[in-house]
Amino acid sequence: MKKVTIQDVARELNLSRNTVAKALNNSDTVSYETRYIVIEKAYEMGYSKLSPVVLNEFKLRNKIDETKTIVVLNRREISVFWNSIIMGISDELNTYGCKLQFNFISEHDEKNLILPLDLQADISGIIILSVFSKDYIDQIMKYNIPIVFLDAPCQVKEIAPYGDIVICESKDSINTITSSLIKKGMTKIGFIGDITYCKTIYDRYQGYLSALQEAGIVPDERIIATYHANTKFYKPEEVEAALLEFPYMPEAIVCANDDIALYVIRHLNSKGISVPNDVAVTGYDNAEEMAKVEPFLTTVRVGNQRLGRRLVQQLMWRLKNPNFPKEVIFVGVEVIFRESSNTPICTDSNG
């Protein structure tokens, strides 16, 4: 990484190098406000020669500490999806010189409104990765600590006043995937995903429905499983149970995430049903473990480490701008077409 110089700071602020040098030395020949602006920018850019006197003055003005502690809260999910997100959070917090405190929240803790003891310490901010109950979030809000949420309940307004929300785009991407299946001649297209607990899964279902509607296809409720499942279809037996309820095998199954898609593929293979020759299957997340599955899965790349970094960046911005209105931020994604949806055009189907 290139070393930040006085000239770099001067160029960024459109000030002379001499003015910036004096400000960084806390010279009275430069106005306090100019010194503050220069010190702030130098700190942001990573200028390494700030004197203790100058740095302390900057800290007092902004009420910040070099060793801010950020708490990350996550439910004990079965999926390994979160690992790379947490890596991105950790890497980005390191660039800000912050400490990461990670906490798993059990169902018992959430139900009984038991918060981590860490929240009673000197915490600068919170990143919440799971969609917790409103009662649990209300308990966290009592500490008056800035929060950034990943995802939200289906009704975003439930938590919108509480903090910034980062959401991965879902509707358009799943619409694109479903439309591609329709263009291949498929009309009997199923969907599996618990749409009751978070906006992203709900939006994926809406993307699936919108593609069918645009093509003039009436959804067949018999091959749609969107009900609440205990582990949100993160266990293979829940996915198998949904498939066994289907009165016939669809030409394609759009899955709310890659974990569900993997369980669908395994179940179909166990029944002698080939993917994609007999049934097309698609997912969402581009999970790394899917690379081990044949055929390769049509999915949506989120960029989990990048997403983790984005959560931290938003929190750091919020700490500096506490009075700005709360924001809902949609992060762009990329549809990846692979072999699992490459089914030949169907000329006949039963159902």
Image: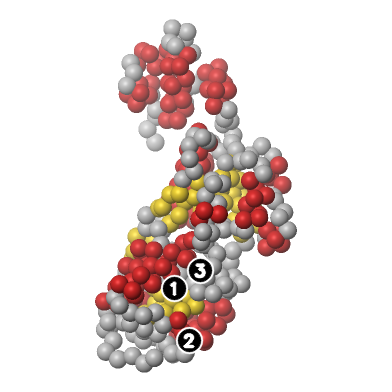
Contact between marks 1 and 3 (CB within 8 A): the answer is no
Q: Amino acid at mark 3?
A: Ile
Label located before the other in sequence (2 or 1): 2
Is disc 3 placed on a helix, strand or loop?
loop
Query: Is residue 192 among the parts visible in the rendering?
Result: yes
Q: Quadrant of the C terminus?
A: bottom left
Which residue is labeled 2 in the image? 246
Going by the numbered disc 2, the residue's amino acid type is Phe
Mark positioned earlier in the residue sequence (1 or 3): 3
Q: CA distance from mark 2 to mark 1?
A: 14 Å
Q: Which mark is residue 255?
A: 1
Circle number at residue 195: 3
Q: Quadrant of residue 13?
A: top left
The kind of residue on which mark 1 rests is Cys
Q: Is residue 24 above or below residue 44?
A: above
- At horizontal 73% and vertical 58% (from top left) the residue drawn is 112
- Per the model, the C-alpha gap separating discs 1 and 3 is 11 Å
* Mark pair 2, 3: CA separation: 18 Å
Q: Nearer the viewer, residue 147 or 134?
A: 134
Location of residue 350 (image quadrant): bottom left
Instruction: Judge by depth and name the residue closer to the eye, 24 or 57.
Output: 57
Q: Residue 81's x, y, as percent? A: 51, 62
Residue 286: x %, y % from top left: 41, 64
Q: Which residue is depicted at the point 34% across and 85% down?
A: 277
Instruction: Compare marks 2 and 3 and give the one earlier in the sequence.
Output: 3
The crowding category of the residue bearing disc 1, from other C-alpha atoms within 10 Å (few below 14, some 14 to 19, many at least 20), is many
